[in-house]
Image (tube, rainbow, N blue to C red):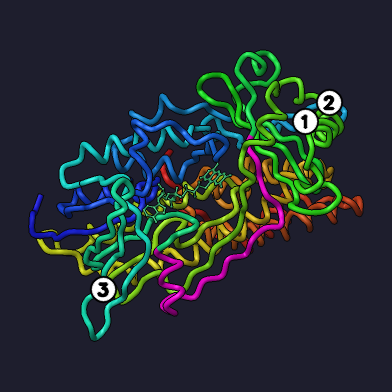
């Protein structure tokens, strides 16, 4: 390690902050991480707040790069596909991919965070400081250099630290972003969804024998849905996504009787698996969901927003954390590309990061919104089911050119999100065309199908898997 590579502040010890700290300290940078919460290795998990997450190939690739997958693999439960539960109690299984290795994993947010923090704590060069809140940023001016305004939670003592260089990985509600936006240094658009979410528990004893373990369960109901992801202990965490207001909404579920009647009507098969439903519905928070667009992501080459602080998205593609992990590996690669024995040229690194990353984070923000409609509605639509089967058939026949969009995003980290979005649009037009010819009774033959695919879809650069 070279001691002259300088210091770096990171605000937030979530997935983005901890993984970045680890990767940059390994390159000889002294990293100070400031986290507002207590050390999660010793603290109890919060109830009802995003208990488990889907981890997919992009996240796994970043964690492998950091050499952490051996520690994290035992924390994962595979999810091989979606189990769709209809109103009449019938179910159908839609596998996520077609190859044996094409599945995603459920992981507890708190155990994953603990594993990342443990790895960062062991890394020479990383100092983790818990109970330290960043309340704002004082930008550089003629009166002096910029500073991060901090507060120690236990003593309530305010203090300042030099701003440059800082990575703000303080999540979707980023205090750093709010402070800089208030000073006119960043333009921020937050597009809030008019649907909220609430997490509910299915204990292991009830789930056993009733819910197949290696699946993501969905109860799609058109304008809303319930989903459930498995946990290592055999329990499931269910999440209800529902409009905030209106006839069928969180606002309409203001009494135990209303909640009971709603679950009996819409989710009769899962209701007996939730013994504490009414108490949990009352006490668990009702979370908000939205997409955050920020421009620029950096200020004066001194501070860069990273992860959800820069580009929070809705959770329906299960990609927010996966995308944040990709941020970390890109940033580490840009630092590694600079001269090894010097402090990184942060302004250049920040500019290159935003140039390469923004088209991709914009693309996944778009696809995540699309996926809400797919999960709560389209999965029951015969046209969607038919085109999904056709897309999988085209992937089998033309694997070097046609990969369903969900698979590109979830299983192919070598295909950037922006490329997945672009190719997905071309592929959708092809699927509509094939469907239209079939509907006319004149299905496309092999050679005209091949000609259309080869004309519109370039050969993919494949990674060895
Ligand atoms: P965060 O995880 O938010 O971490 C930020 C950290 O900064 C926290 O530790 C916080 O305590 C700390 N902090 C905040 N403010 C301050 C401050 N002022 N001072 C000091 N520290 C501060 N993603 C997936 O990939 N798969 C999924 O299945 C998935 N499901 C989701 C389901 C829901 C309901 C939600 C809401 C999100 C989901 N996500 C999912 C998204 C995922 O949670 C985020 O994208 C990911 O956590 C982003 O990581 P981050 O490190 O950028 O931010």
Q: Nearer the viewer, residue 58 or 412?
A: 58
| Secondary structure beneath label 3 | loop
Which residue is rendered at x = 61% and y = 26% of the image? 236
- Which callout, 3 or 1, points at the residue further toward the start of the chain? 1
Q: Which range is magenta?
A: 176-199
Residue 333 included in the magenta stretch of the image = no
Q: Quadrant of the C terminus?
A: top left
Q: Nearer the viewer, residue 446 or 464?
A: 464
| Secondary structure beneath label 1 | strand
For the residues bearing labels 2 and 3, Cβ distance under 8 angstroms: no
Q: CA distance from mark 2 to mark 1?
A: 6 Å
Q: Which residue is mark 1?
A: 85
Q: Quadrant of residue 68?
A: top left
Q: Is residue 166 left or right of residue 112?
A: left
In the rendered image, residue 223, in percent from the top left (x then y), is placed at 80, 48
Tag shown at residue 367: none
User: Dot 1 surroundings within 10 Å: few (below 14), some, or many (20 or more)?
Assistant: many
Q: Nearer the viewer, residue 232 or 334?
A: 232
Query: Does the rendering let one see residue 332?
Result: no
Please tell me whether mark 2 or mark 3 is closer to you in this view: 3
Q: Which residue is mark 2?
A: 89
In the rendered image, residue 126, in percent from the top left (x then y), is placed at 21, 46
Q: Nearer the viewer, residue 299 or 173?
A: 173
Q: CA distance from mark 3 to mark 1?
A: 54 Å
In the rendered image, residue 120, in percent from the top left (x then y), is placed at 26, 41
């Amino acid at each position: 390690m070279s001691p002259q590579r300088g210091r770096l502040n990171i605000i937030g010890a979530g997935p983005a902050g901890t993984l970045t700290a680890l990767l940059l300290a390994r390159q000889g940078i002294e990293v100070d991480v400031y986290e507002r919460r207590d050390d999660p290795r010793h603290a109890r998990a919060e109830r009802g707040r995003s208990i488990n997450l889907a981890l997919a190939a992009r996240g796994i690739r970043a964690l492998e790069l950091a050499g952490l997958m051996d520690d994290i693999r035992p924390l994962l439960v595979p999810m091989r596909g979606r189990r769709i539960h209809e109103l009449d109690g019938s179910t159908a299984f839609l596998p996520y991919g077609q190859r044996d290795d094409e599945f995603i994993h459920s992981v507890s947010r708190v155990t994953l965070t603990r594993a990342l923090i443990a790895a960062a704590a062991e890394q020479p060069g990383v100092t983790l400081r818990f109970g330290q809140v960043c309340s704002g940023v004082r930008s550089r001016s003629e009166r002096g250099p910029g500073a991060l305004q901090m507060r120690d939670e236990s003593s309530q003592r305010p203090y300042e630290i030099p701003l440059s260089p800082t990575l703000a990985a303080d999540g979707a509600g980023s205090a750093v972003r709010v402070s800089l936006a208030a000073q006119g240094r960043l333009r921020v658009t937050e597009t809030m969804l008019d649907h909220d979410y609430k997490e509910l528990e299915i204990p292991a004893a009830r789930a056993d024998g009733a819910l197949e373990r290696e699946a993501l369960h969905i109860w799609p109901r058109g304008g809303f849905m319930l989903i459930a992801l498995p946990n290592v202990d055999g329990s499931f965490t269910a999440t209800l996504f529902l409009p905030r207001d209106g006839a069928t909404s969180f606002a309409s579920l203001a009494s135990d009787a209303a909640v009971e009647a709603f679950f009996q009507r819409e989710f009769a098969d899962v209701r007996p698996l939730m013994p504490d439903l009414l108490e949990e519905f009352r006490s668990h928070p009702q979370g908000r969901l939205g997409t955050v667009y920020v421009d620029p992501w950096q200020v004066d080459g001194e501070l860069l927003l990273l992860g959800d602080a820069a580009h929070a998205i809705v959770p329906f593609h299960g990609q927010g954390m996966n995308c944040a992990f990709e941020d970390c590996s890109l940033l580490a690669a840009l630092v590694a590309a600079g001269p090894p024995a010097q402090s990184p040229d942060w302004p250049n690194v920040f500019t290159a990061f935003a140039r390469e990353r923004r088209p991709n984070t914009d693309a996944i923000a778009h696809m995540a919104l699309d996926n809400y409609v797919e999960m709560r509605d389209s999965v029951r639509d015969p046209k969607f089911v038919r085109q999904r089967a056709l897309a999988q058939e085209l992937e089998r026949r033309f694997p070097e050119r046609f990969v369903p969009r969900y698979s590109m995003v979830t299983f192919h980290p070598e295909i950037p999100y922006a490329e997945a979005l672009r190719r997905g649009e071309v592929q959708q037009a092809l699927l509509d065309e094939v469907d239209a010819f079939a509907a006319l009774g004149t299905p496309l033959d092999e050679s005209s199908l091949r000609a259309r695919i080869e004309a519109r879809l370039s050969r993919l650069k494949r990674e060895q898997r």
